[in-house]
Amino acid sequence: MVYENRKVLVVGMARSGVAAAQLLRAAGAEVTVNDLKTEEQLGDQLAPLEGLQLERRFGCGAEGLLEGKDVLVISPGVPDSAPFVVKAKEMGIYVVGELELAYQLSRGTMVAVSGTNGKTTTVSLLGEIFRNAGRVTHVVGNIGYPYSLASLVSKKDDVIVCEVSSFQMETADTFCPHVGLLTNITEDHLNRHGTMEVYTSLKMRMFRRQSADDFAVFNADDPGTQGLSGQVRSHVLKFSRLREVKEGAFVRDETVFLRLNGQEKTVCRTEEIRIPGPHNLENALGAVCVAAAMDVPIPVIRHSLKTFRGVEHRIESVREFRGVEYINDSKGTNVDSTIKAVQTMNRPTVIILGGYDKHTSFDPLSSEMMKNRSIIREAVLIGETADQIEYSLRRAGFDSITRADTLRDAVEKAQSLAGEGWNVLLSPACASFDMFSDYEERGRVFKEIVNSL
């Protein structure tokens, strides 16, 4: 797609929208930027656009701005079913998301990671692996660094490691990674996608344009991904912490092995992988497959697994205070992610749960908490889902429940409930939008509260 001299409307001035506007101006497009918020409300978010020649239309909807436009760029937060998006398509306007736009205008080899959980940790680990291998690497996408910013500077020999969400795939038509990894699929975002079938099909769009020269990596242990590898045309690799696989990465005798091109190689001992928990072992195994497909030497992969410290807001130790360790898992924005955090705990824990309602069931989490009742001793509930979570917990037989009005109130109540040698774990199992702008803000506020105790 050529954007030079095209009239483009960019809707949504969060990070990805601002970056898309920058990229489009560099490509020679005539750009109009729009947001429902006023310029004053957007404030410093617009700073990167200073000095760029573009039309600013803030504090209004997008529907009245479509006339005469060739292209509409929407942020991941805008569903493709939004009325102004539907109208744009009816008018013959080309509708594209920031991910697809950046892919069309970037250079380098694309590695993409999608799935319900584990994406951020896995792309961050892969970024570390490729940098340790001496490759110029850009870690982009849903992780918080817009792909469009990397597209402004990427070169042919660079590696692009992209975290891909189901929202972004709604508008991804030509997007095609050389190596694509699907970490897992569990119930999430049904408030937007409606059914698990739609959600799964959006995840699988990542592989749609791959050829036999590309690689598709699947989690052999995850029920949600079973049978999906048969739908792709690319070279399939699998990973498992429970059994050996024909091609890919697996664990045998507490050692990680890689099978590829008829050869089996030892990677490292599982105890040498620095990031904790069975879910992170799965993330590491997936990363081993991707790195091997990209011809990274085993010693580089081994070193990276031994030294990678994990990511902010994902089972992140904040502070030990009066014998209690406070753990920030604000990125636990869905039930399955919080289940994995629960499984990682190895001493008595007070868990803080609740947030924005994504229309998912909390029953699997309640069952897991009952199964680990000797570890998960108390639950403090906040946010708009508190009633739903309490109902689910009590139905499962978990009744050590405390309610809190704010995150600070929740931390203070958790502090009073925790004894010496305990954990206080923030892993909400919900998005943050009822109280915070995103999980990152929620995690930062949690850390500020903990550090002020």
Image (spheres, rainbow, N blue to C red):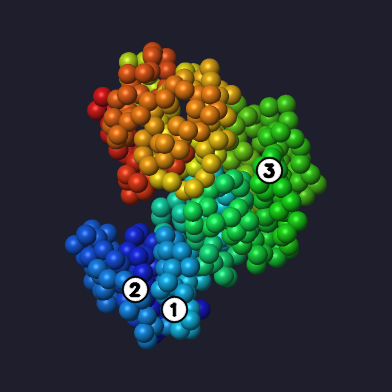
x and y, in percent, of residue 51 in the image = 23, 71
Q: Please, what is the three-letter code of the amino acid marked with disc 3?
A: Pro
Residue 129 seen in the current view: no
x and y, in percent, of residue 184 in the image = 61, 46
Task: Give SS at disc 3.
Answer: helix
Q: CA distance from mark 3 to mark 2?
A: 41 Å
Q: Please, what is the three-letter code of the amino acid marked with disc 1?
A: Ala
| Category of crowding for the residue at label 3, using alpha-carbon neighbours closer than 10 angstroms: few (below 14), some (14–19), many (at least 20) | few
The residue at the point 44 percent across, 61 percent down is: 76
Q: Give the residue number, with chain letter if any, for mark 2.
A: 62
x and y, in percent, of residue 321 in the image = 32, 19
| Category of crowding for the residue at label 1, using alpha-carbon neighbours closer than 10 angstroms: few (below 14), some (14–19), many (at least 20) | many
x and y, in percent, of residue 212 in the image = 73, 63
Q: Earlier in the sequence, mark 1 or mark 2?
A: 2
Q: Give the residue number, with chain letter if any, for mark 3.
A: 223
| Category of crowding for the residue at label 2, using alpha-carbon neighbours closer than 10 angstroms: few (below 14), some (14–19), many (at least 20) | many
Q: Is residue 5 above or below residue 109?
A: below
Q: Is residue 160 above or below residue 241?
A: below
Q: Earlier in the sequence, mark 3 or mark 1?
A: 1
Q: Is residue 146 left or right of residue 209?
A: left
Q: Which of the two residues, 140 or 321, is positioned nearer the viewer here?
A: 321
